[in-house]
Amino acid sequence: MIRSLFRAACAATCVAVLAACAASPPTLSTGATTAAAPAGAARQATGSGTASPLTTPARKSETVKVGLLLPLSGGGQAGLVAETMRKAAELAVTDLNAPHVTLLVRDDKATPEGAEAAAREVTTAGAEIILGPLFARSVQAAASVARPANVPLVAFSNDRQVAGPGVSLLSFLAEPEVGRVISYAAAQGKKRLVALVPDDAYGKIVEIALRQAAARDGARLLAIEIYPSQANGMLDAVTKLRDAMRGIEEHGDPIDALFIAGGEEALAALSPQLKQSGIVTPRLKVLGTGALDYANAGRDPILLGAWFAAPDPKGWKDFADRYARAHGHAPPRIASLAYDAVGVAVALSQGPDGARYIPSQMLRQSGFTGVDGHFRLTSDGLADRALAVLEVQAFGARVIDLPPAQSAEKVARLH
């Protein structure tokens, strides 16, 4: 189920793909803050029971205020997801043994106006860093308050256009996933590629990333077809790709791989048409983004054995188990972003007042390690993540290539 919700990576909202949040949460007061965690509550993500010295603050008596802006009163899935992200953030405060950190939780009402008001409220209350909002327009509005106040924003939007100085996006983006899986495939000799990408903003980003990755890794993108969102329109794109592949193979070497961009719904509609067309054969490796990692992907014979790039799932599994024990239901996949954002705030909270969250600390080369593995915040406002390569199995997915190794001395662990 890893990050199927991010399959529309440049959309302004991500509500429609958050169905994993199944339980109805309790009502939250918009002015709520977290309770102090009991001493010694921090634990390693592995469940070893050993507290991490890097998350033990130097001055526990000094309160550090952290703003958390979420669409708590947003309708439908937005409100449900916001509530689970709040719970994940509070779980991080407890897990990381940070009673000195106070979360100033505010409802941004899923609107730019609400986000601006919420950002103003938490900065006035003394927040040194703001986590959130979730939606792109809300991030822009909150940034209009945070930037003049020199308060950094770590947001959860997947629209890279809102990233920049003072605004970091912790979300998952398509480009690094495409680059990682294409690099791995090329190293395995899969260098002659064709692709199917959706006719939307996400598809345009994937197409650019594919062309760049192929050129960098010595692969060739021989044909690409754009498919519409309507199932009855997908057949035309599949047929055109099949005909192109036949023409290519008549005049050259066999095609090695088919890259398919899309989430669960799109792939479910494409799969029978791919099967009927005869495109997918045992020698053709299917590739994709992290959107391939959903619960039933392996039941589809077209996707069984496909490769995709995503964080090592071990950290997510450990977090999801802790969350479920605490709240009685599984978290949606996006909840890890709130947990890791709090981890960043906690990891830097030991610094002196006024210098905890300055750019040199936020963008430190050593980065951080959280639920979704190692990452580094960059000057362009994006998260540079260490991604694994996974293979779709009949039940779930398995890691076939670990993320790039990180020096234990260099990585500052969040837990």
Image (cartoon, rainbow, N blue to C red):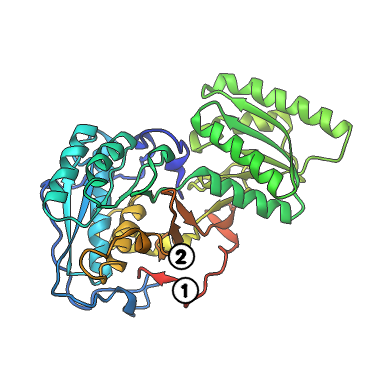
Give the spatial CA distance, label 2 vs label 1: 9 Å
At x 63% / y 48%, what residue is drawn?
306
- Which secondary structure lies at badge 2? loop
> Within 10 angstroms of label 1, few (less than 14), some, or many (20 or more) residues?
few
Residue most extreme to the front? 148
Residue 230: x and y, percent? 52, 21
Q: Is residue 236 above or below residue 392?
A: above
Give SS at disc 1. Answer: loop
Residue depicted at x 17% and y 73%: 38
Residue contact between numbered discs 2 and 1, judged by CB atoms under 8 Å: yes
Q: Nearer the viewer, mark 2 or mark 1?
A: 2
Kindly identify the amino acid type of the residue bearing the numbered disc 1: Lys
Disc assigned to residue 384: none
Residue 255 higher or lower than 387, as above or below: above
Measured as percent of width and height from the top left, residue 257 is found at 72, 43
Where is residue 345 drawn, in percent x and y?
Answer: 28, 62
Q: Earlier in the sequence, mark 2 or mark 1?
A: 2
- Vertical arrangement, residue 152 with respect to residue 315, above or below: above
Q: Quadrant of residue 94?
A: bottom left
| Residue at position x 26%, y 57% in the image | 89
Q: Which mark is residue 410?
A: 1
For residue 73, say whether it is visible: no
| Location of mark 2 (residue) | 365
